[in-house]
Image: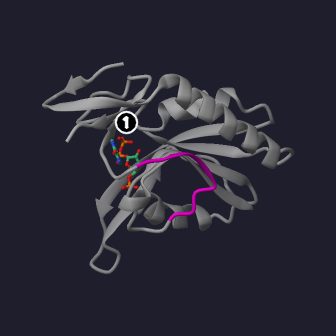
Amino acid sequence: MSIITVHDKQFQPYITAADIQQRIAQMASEINRDLQGKRPLFIAILNGSFMFAGDMFKHITIDAEISFIKLVSYKGTKSTGNVITSIGLDEDLYGRTVVILEDIVDTGKTLSMFLPQLEHQQPEQLLIASLLHKPDAQTHPVKIDYLGFSVPNKFLLGYGLDYDGLGRNLPEIYQLVD
Ligand SMILES: O=P(O)(O)OC[C@H]1O[C@H](OP(=O)(O)OP(=O)(O)O)[C@H](O)[C@@H]1O
Ligand code: HPA
């Protein structure tokens, strides 16, 4: 692995494909152990989580379902501010064990705005699995139940994460060179 250029910026190798795969297998085995008999519904948040979700789900050996949703942000009223809603969620979450699959929790804003909408449907359990977390960037509290890697507050690329549309196809994760 070496330094790559995407658009106008340089990125250096940060997490190898092998390390990502190994960590995901460990996360999946924790989930298999914890959620045995619960028939969890995994909800993957597009676009970024598509690779993580696919690789994670291959390691899930208990009965489980998966659904993919896209979050849409729009301007609410003066009192509600910006609102995040989802498209593509057809399942009824009432009484279900739900596991959200995210590629990254950065500021935490996306999930902290969206999770109350899921909680409103009264799932039995609402769990978060995120491949990456930037604790130093977080401004909105989000409790992550299954975490792949805690990372510094630097822009990342690859394995689903993009820089202006490019780089999602990289099998490893790169860090912006500053
Ligand atoms: O914790 P936050 O600061 O809210 O950032 C995390 C969110 O940002 C990314 O999505 P993005 O909105 O870039 O869309 P994408 O998945 O389509 O790239 C990522 O997939 C998370 O959903
Ligand atoms: O570090 C990042 N890289 C790409 N997309 C992102 N979305 C939130 N954080 C990031």
**Which quarter holds ligand 2?**
top left
Q: Would you say residue 81 sits in the magenta stretch?
A: no
Quarter of the image where one finds residue 135 = bottom left
Residue 126 at x, y = what percent? Answer: 66, 59
Q: Is residue 92 above or below residue 158?
A: below
At x 53% / y 67%, what residue is drawn? 116
- Can you tell me whether the CB of the residue at mark 1 lies under 8 Å from the nearest atom of ligand 2? yes
Residue bearing mark 1: 161
Quadrant assignment for the N terminus: top left
Q: Would you say residue 149 sits in the magenta stretch?
A: yes
Q: Of 9 and 126, which appears nearest the observer?
A: 9
Q: Residue furthest top?
A: 1
Q: Amino acid at mark 1?
A: Leu
Residue 153 relative to residue 53: left or right:
left
Residue 38 relative to residue 72: left or right:
right
- Segment tinted magenta in the rendering: 142-151
Residue 63 at x, y = what percent? Answer: 80, 36
At x 51% / y 64%, what residue is drawn? 142
Q: Of 14 and 70, which appears nearest the observer?
A: 14
Residue 172 at x, y = what percent? Answer: 43, 26
Residue 175 relative to residue 149: left or right:
left
